[in-house]
Amino acid sequence: MEVDLSLLKSTKGLLKISEMVCVFVAFVSFTVASRPPYIAATCMEFFITLGFFLLYLLKLNKTSVFFFWPLVDVFNSFFAAALMCILSLVAVSTYTVKATLSGGVRVTL
């Protein structure tokens, strides 16, 4: 299996890494606040982004030609942005624990 190390220095790779870091920090914040719906949404988005990152890092998108992977990635990014925006608005407006507020703010970044 071939590894594309140039992805780690490219814009796409850096954006995927930064998205995973932000979602992971929000996940930790929601875990501290013990808010299960927020934990599930951020965990799901983290693993989907990790999947796309590994897909591009291991060059599996070149071997699996069933889908047009850049278009699938764009659709995922749009739906993830909408989901995280709604999640952050709900978390910020209905927070009861400070960690929920910090998680909601972290998701928007």
Image (cartoon, rainbow, N blue to C red):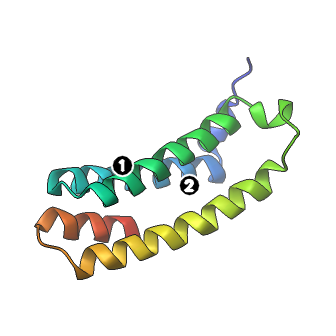
Is residue 38 visible in this depiction of the protein? yes
Residue 88 lies, in percent from the top left, at 35, 73
Looking at numbered disc 1 in the image, what kind of residue is underneath it?
Answer: Phe
Q: Nearer the viewer, residue 54 or 31?
A: 31
Is residue 109 visible in this depiction of the protein? no
**Secondary structure type for disc 2:** helix
**Secondary structure type for disc 1:** helix
Quadrant of image for the C terminus: bottom left
- Residue located beneath label 1 in the image: 24
Q: Residue furthest front?
A: 37
Q: Residue furthest left?
A: 97
In the image, what residue occupies the spot 60% across and 67% down? 79
In the image, what residue occupies the spot 32% across and 59% down? 37
Q: Nearer the viewer, residue 69 or 91?
A: 91
Residue 43 lies, in percent from the top left, at 40, 48
Quadrant of image for the N terminus: top right
Looking at numbered disc 2 in the image, what kind of residue is underneath it?
Answer: Leu
Residue 15 lies, in percent from the top left, at 56, 55
Mark-to-mark CA distance, 2 and 1: 14 Å
Which one is closest to the eye, mark 2 or mark 1?
1
> From the viewer's perspective, is 109 left or right of 14?
left
Decide which of tag 2 and tag 1 comes sooner along the chain. 2
Q: Is residue 14 above or below residue 81?
A: above
The mark found on residue 8 in the picture is none
Q: Is residue 39 above or below residue 74?
A: above
- Residue located beneath label 2 in the image: 15
Q: Quadrant of residue 51?
A: top right
